[in-house]
Image: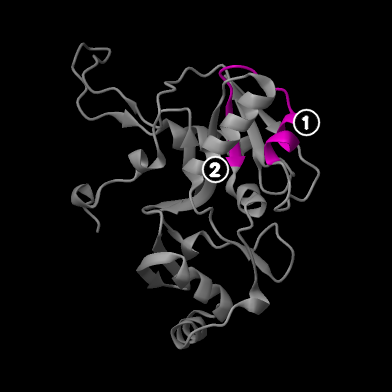
Amino acid sequence: MKITPVYIDKEINSDDNLSKIILNSANVTDGDILVIAQKIISKQEGRLVELSTVNPSLLSEGISSQYKKDPRIVELVLSESKRIVRMKNGLIITETKNGFICANSGIDESNVVNGFATLLPLNSDESAERLRKEIFEQTGKTVAVIISDTFGRPFRMGQTNCAIGISGIEPILDYSGTLDSFNRVLRVTAIAIADELSSAAELVMGKTTKSPVAIIRDYSFNSEKHNINDLIRPETEDLFK
């Protein structure tokens, strides 16, 4: 398996043809997996907010004073969330409208012009599907697309990249029913390969190298139609909700 960063020396804007920009910067072939940072998807889709236009509520003002955060950011965090999961030690963990559990509803001020913040894409699966179709139309190549973002993890220090949108790839490799090396039947082993591929890609993408895309080549995967909800544990199975 090979993982190659794609260098893009351009600030992505809402009127850009993102698939064309990617293809001008890299060669793709059938079976490639394109891992694309959420940030450039959000920028291209206009999910960029000028903070001076945000009017914080009284609740946002109260939380911001307690947690020493910009009240405008807190307002965005609340508006993009279904619920607050936990607030402690300056952190606000929320469940986003798409069902992701993450810090600050995915609101991010890094790698954007000062005074702006990005929101998560409205539907990352649709974003991934659109890019996949555009790449096929322009090249005739069939690829898979994963949109990734950086999430913290309960019980573990540090952050990892996780998939928040997919197209053309089954996100979980289920070993249930297969035999291990001692001929015992595996019953519950299901590997979140979309998350693992996202994390592997981040090793070459980085955060400061202007490489918001990585191409993973020579990895065998199932291309049946799936969506990111396959990776979100149902509430009835979640022991921590």
Bounds of the magenta span? 18-36
Q: CA distance from mark 1 to mark 2?
A: 19 Å
Q: Position of residue 200 (x, y in %)?
A: 55, 33
Front position in the image: 30 or 62: 30
Classify mark 2: helix, strand or loop.
Answer: helix
Residue at the farthest front position = 137
Please give the name of the residue rendered at 41% of the width and 32% of the height, measured from the top-left corner.
171
Please give the name of the residue rendered at 40% of the width and 37% of the height, measured from the top-left corner.
227
In the picture, the disc for residue 174 is: none
For residue 37, above or below residue 222: below
Disc 1 marks a residue whose amino acid type is Asn
Please give the name of the residue rendered at 41% of the width and 54% of the height, measured from the top-left corner.
98
Q: Position of residue 123 (x, y in %)?
A: 48, 49
Front position in the image: 160 or 115: 115
Identify the mark nearer the N-term, 1 or 2. Answer: 1
In the picture, the disc for residue 24 is: 1
Task: Answer yes or no: is residue 115 visible.
Answer: yes
Q: Position of residue 169 (x, y in %)?
A: 45, 28
Colour pattern of the rendering: one colour
Disc 2 marks a residue whose amino acid type is Ser
Q: Which quarter of the image is occupied by the C terminus?
A: bottom left
Q: Which residue is mark 2?
A: 127
Classify mark 1: helix, strand or loop.
Answer: helix
For residue 206, above or below residue 63: above
In this rendering, position of residue 229 left or right of residue 14: left
